[in-house]
Image (cartoon, rainbow, N blue to C red):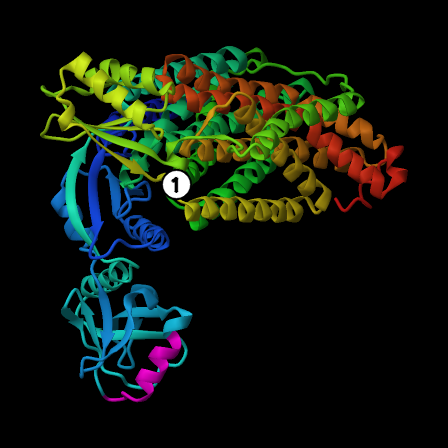
């Protein structure tokens, strides 16, 4: 016994030291985390088209290509149109405009020419340019640039190279030859490589220049500034405080409800927070509000994994097992639900990063990191600490809780009522959307990030602090606009403040100018205003939709593969669609502002919903194997939902608490993000408990009517 206690004490000390060290280095690393434009600001660069005013299509195309270009520097960069011939780029987490301009390059014209000066093709006929490393015939590494041409450029390049074997093609950028590769053979496949580079850096520079030169419009730098955070210092401070308070409440809740296991989970979650901070800094992830949503979801999943395990331990103790045996069996039985739930969400995160852009990538990055860490802390760290505490002498079952078998609640008996409530909730939002569209309005209340707005530059007579801007300037602006989505950015080293709002009418612009003069003594002639496009382009919206569709299909396939039953997968996806539609209905009904956080909110709900559903389906799968033909199918479903009901409530409650504290303590822009997230958490819990099992049951009975009375587990493909 002494030996076990010694091991337990040593192990617990190691765990506590690890928490302290990770906490210390985590907070130290927190200063190294890159924050997005909404949290910390960055560099703002404005380019103007050279020559004749380009068409709207050309500007839109150029803007999208620039978006893809700057995402190599930061996935959270924003690119939007300003006026008819300008493009503005906001890049977060940096404060050296010159370094950014040097790294980004000057967007100029690109031409492929023969040595007589005849144009073969232009830069806008280049599809892509990527640096790479290949093995040469001698076994050495060669640095190359791989080019792919658009369909209209493929034939032109094929015709030219067929007649130029042995000659050089000059790649001319902004009037200067940047490369002159020799044609070795006719290139008819639309792809080629340029070799002869001395280093990978040289290859990357050439590829980058070709990419930036393939823009539809030639641009020149107009101005560049270092700007402050959009949400302001007050929003950041209140969010951090809210996160700390919410996390503290979750810790207290876990210890009160789950006793010794709750203490073990709390220590492990402390490690989790330290690790996530370190990894965000190590991988140089740019953290924004949508990224914080990914972290909130991953913390919820970390808590969820622990709750699943502890519920299993209580059940095993209630079945008469010793505490030590219950701990071992509890972790083993919880493994499949934890792995399936986390892997399903991880698949979604990977697809979203692969196919998404902008804030979608940021969300996916933080979510993926969080999922991997949550599984690690729950399955290994929590188990290690729990065994240490047991060896310290906490062997009495009263320290772990005892859960006796409960009588199954007839959840299927209320399925028709639940279906009707869900249909009404969705229709309550869909009908107003349809009416607005029919009257020529937008279906939802799109924010300036979608529909664009007005950017007003105000030069104050004194240097306004971020706190003064948030507390004094913003209320004056919002009194005129009547909306709470005002974004402000302070230009470093000047008295200038950029105020972004919804599109203002001429009268509203004049009212804003007068308000600035009356309240702050600003000279109205120093106030300028420009119309700006939304930071979320149509291409980015399409990228997000495609990413979500592919992620949903991949999740469906994974669930089908793991549960060997397409009805499980179909039920999960239907419930997922239900949750998204209900939250969208709330956006419609209450006219909540739809911005980039809307995308993050919906993605969070998708991840949360699918994870909660997997836990219930895992228990149904287990009970089908356990009871075979001894229970009716309806009994199995009701019992499975009852057994996981406490887990569903406790997990939702802990995640809800964190978001609720954020809602209570946050500024208006934070509350607009937290409110729909709370609705999504409640909706996800409801659909998992009341809809998914019922949907699976109905589809199973419809396909096999005999299963309504007797469960044929083996014939069901389990």
Q: Identify which residue is drawn at 55% across, 26% down.
A: 588
Question: In the rendering, at what x and y percent does residue 357 appear?
Answer: 39, 46
Instruction: Please say whether residue 442 is visible from this viewpoint.
Output: yes
Q: For this rendering, which residue is in front, 543 or 472?
A: 472
Residue identified by numbered label 1: 536
Question: In the rendering, at what x and y percent does residue 373 appear?
Answer: 42, 35
Q: Identify which residue is drawn at 32% across, 52% down.
A: 59
Location of the C terminus by quadrant is top right
Q: Is residue 14 left or right of residue 672?
A: left
Identify the main secondary structure in magenta: helix
- Residue 506 forms part of the magenta stretch: no
Relative to 138, say whether 335 is above or below.
above
Q: Is residue 274 left or right of residue 363?
A: left
Instruction: Please say whether residue 329 is visible from this viewpoint.
Output: no
Q: Is residue 587 left or right of residue 664?
A: right
Identify the element where label 1 is drawn. loop
Residue at the outermost front position: 507
Question: In the rendering, at what x and y percent does residue 153 appear?
Answer: 36, 73
Question: In the rendering, at what x and y percent does residue 58 appear?
Answer: 34, 55
Q: For this rendering, which residue is in front, 396 or 642?
A: 642
Find the magenta span and give its range: 154-166
Relative to 353, say whether 678 is above or below.
above
- Residue 161 forms part of the magenta stretch: yes
Q: Identify which residue is drawn at 32% across, 69% down.
A: 146
Q: For this rendering, which residue is in front, 395 or 365?
A: 365
Q: Is residue 405 left or right of residue 557?
A: right
Characterize the local packing of mark 1: few (<14), some (14-19) or many (20 or more) Cα atoms within 10 angstroms: many
């Amino acid at each position: 016994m002494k030996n076990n206690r010694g091991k337990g004490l040593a192990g617990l000390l190691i765990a506590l030291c690890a928490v302290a060290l990770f906490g210390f280095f985590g907070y130290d690393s927190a200063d190294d985390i890159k924050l997005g434009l909404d949290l910390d600001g960055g560099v703002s660069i404005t380019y103007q088209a050279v020559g004749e005013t380009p068409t709207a299509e050309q500007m839109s195309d150029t803007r999208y290509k620039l978006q893809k270009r700057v995402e190599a520097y930061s996935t959270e960069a924003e690119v939007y149109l300003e006026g008819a011939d300008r493009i503005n780029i906001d890049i977060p987490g940096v404060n050296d405009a010159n370094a950014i301009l040097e790294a980004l390059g000057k967007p100029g014209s690109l031409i492929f020419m023969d040595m007589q000066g005849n144009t073969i093709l232009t830069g806008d006929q280049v599809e892509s340019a990527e640096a790479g490393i290949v093995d040469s015939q001698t076994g050495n590494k060669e640095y190359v640039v791989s080019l792919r041409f658009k369909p209209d450029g493929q034939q032109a390049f094929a015709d030219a190279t067929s007649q130029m074997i042995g000659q050089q093609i000059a790649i001319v950028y902004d009037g200067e030859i940047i490369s002159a590769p020799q044609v070795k053979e006719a290139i008819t496949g639309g792809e080629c490589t340029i070799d002869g580079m001395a280093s990978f850096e040289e290859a990357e520079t050439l590829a980058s220049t070709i990419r930036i030169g393939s823009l539809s419009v030639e641009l020149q730098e107009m101005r560049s500034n270092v700007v402050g955070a959009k949400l302001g210092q007050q929003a950041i401070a209140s969010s951090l405080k809210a996160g700390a308070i919410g996390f503290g409440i979750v810790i207290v809740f876990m210890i009160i409800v789950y006793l010794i296991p709750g203490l073990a989970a709390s220590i492990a979650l402390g490690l989790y927070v330290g690790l996530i901070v370190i990894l965000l800094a190590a991988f140089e992830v740019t953290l924004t509000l949508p990224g914080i949503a990914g972290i909130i979801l991953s913390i919820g999943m970390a808590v969820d994994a622990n709750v699943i395990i502890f519920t299993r331990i209580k059940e095993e103790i209630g079945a008469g097992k010793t505490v030590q045996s219950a701990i071992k069996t509890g972790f083993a039985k919880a493994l499949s639900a934890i792995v399936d739930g986390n892997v399903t969400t991880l698949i979604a995160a990977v697809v979203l990063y692969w196919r998404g852009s902008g804030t979608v990538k940021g969300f996916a990055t933080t979510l993926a990191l969080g999922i991997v860490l949550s599984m690690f802390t729950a399955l290994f760290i929590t188990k290690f600490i729990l065994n240490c505490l047991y060896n310290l002498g906490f062997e009495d079952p009263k320290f772990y809780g005892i859960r006796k078998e409960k009588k199954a609640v007839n959840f299927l008996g209320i399925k028709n009522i639940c279906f009707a409530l869900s249909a009404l909730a969705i229709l309550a939002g869909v009908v107003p959307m349809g009416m607005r569209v029919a009257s020529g309005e937008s279906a939802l209340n799109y924010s300036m990030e979608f529909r664009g707005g007005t950017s007003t530059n105000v030069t104050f007579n004194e240097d306004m602090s971020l706190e003064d801007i948030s507390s004094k300037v913003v209320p004056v602006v919002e009194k005129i606009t009547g909306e709470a989505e005002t974004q402000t950015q302070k230009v470093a080293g000047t008295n200038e403040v950029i105020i972004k709002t919804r599109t203002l009418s001429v009268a509203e612009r004049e009212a804003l100018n007068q308000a600035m003069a009356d309240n702050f003594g600003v000279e109205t002639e120093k106030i300028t205003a420009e119309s700006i496009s939304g930071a979320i382009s149509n291409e980015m919206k399409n990228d997000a939709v495609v990413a979500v569709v592919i992620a949903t299909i991949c999740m469906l396939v994974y669930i089908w593969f793991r549960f060997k039953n397409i009805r499980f997968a179909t039920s999960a996806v239907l419930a997922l669609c239900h949750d998204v539609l209900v939250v969208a209905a709330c956006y419609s009904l209450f006219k909540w502002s739809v911005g980039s956080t809307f995308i993050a909110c919906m993605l969070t709900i998708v991840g949360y919903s699918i994870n909660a559903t997997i836990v219930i389906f895992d228990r149904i799968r287990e009970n089908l194997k356990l009871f075979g033909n001894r229970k009716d199918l309806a009994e199995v479903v009701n019992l499975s939902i009852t057994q996981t009901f406490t887990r569903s409530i406790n997990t939702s409650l802990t995640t809800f608490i964190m978001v609720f504290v954020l809602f209570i303590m946050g500024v208006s822009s934070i509350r607009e993000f937290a409110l729909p997230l709370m609705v999504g958490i409640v909706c996800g819990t409801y659909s998992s408990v009341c809809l998914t099992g019922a949907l699976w049951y109905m589809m199973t009975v419809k396909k096999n009517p005999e299963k309504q009375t007797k469960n044929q587990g083996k014939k069901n493909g389990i």
